[in-house]
Image (cartoon, rainbow, N blue to C red):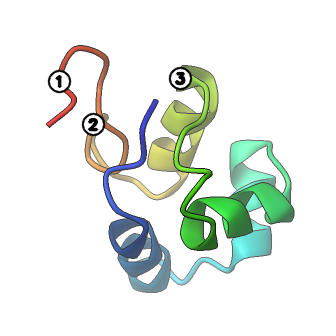
Amino acid sequence: MRLRDPQLLADYMKLRDFTQARLARSAGCSRQFVWQLLNDPNKRTCGSEVAARIEEALAVLPGTIFALPGLES
């Protein structure tokens, strides 16, 4: 799934007091992966399961941070 905007992810992390490491632990991915989503313009996608776990960890509705399949806008 495609990350809508890295700043949106960063804003929700700040709002919920999540570090990259804490989000990685909560979502079952590596801290380096979270860093890539936030900082690497070539890495803005992930699998649907990881995207769902990130959104769940940050307590947002599905499709808030990652575009849902078929709704890419």
- Give how far apart the Cα atoms at labels 2 and 3 are: 10 Å
Q: Which residue is tagged 1?
A: 71
Closer mark to the observer between disc 1 and disc 3: 1
The local crowd at label 3, few if under 14, some if 14 to 19, many if 20 or more residues have their Cα within 10 Å, is some
Tell me if residue 73 comes above or below residue 33 in the rendering: above
Q: Which residue is tagged 3?
A: 48
The local crowd at label 1, few if under 14, some if 14 to 19, many if 20 or more residues have their Cα within 10 Å, is few
Element type at marker 2?
loop
Q: Which residue is tagged 2?
A: 63
Indicate left or right for 24 with 53 as reference.
right
Position in image of residue 45 (x %, y %): 54, 39
Element type at marker 1?
loop
Tell me if residue 29 comes above or below residue 33 in the rendering: above
The local crowd at label 2, few if under 14, some if 14 to 19, many if 20 or more residues have their Cα within 10 Å, is some
Q: Which residue is drawn at 30% across and 35% down?
A: 67
Residue type, mark 2 in image: Gly
Pointers 1 and 2 in contact (CB under 8 A)? yes
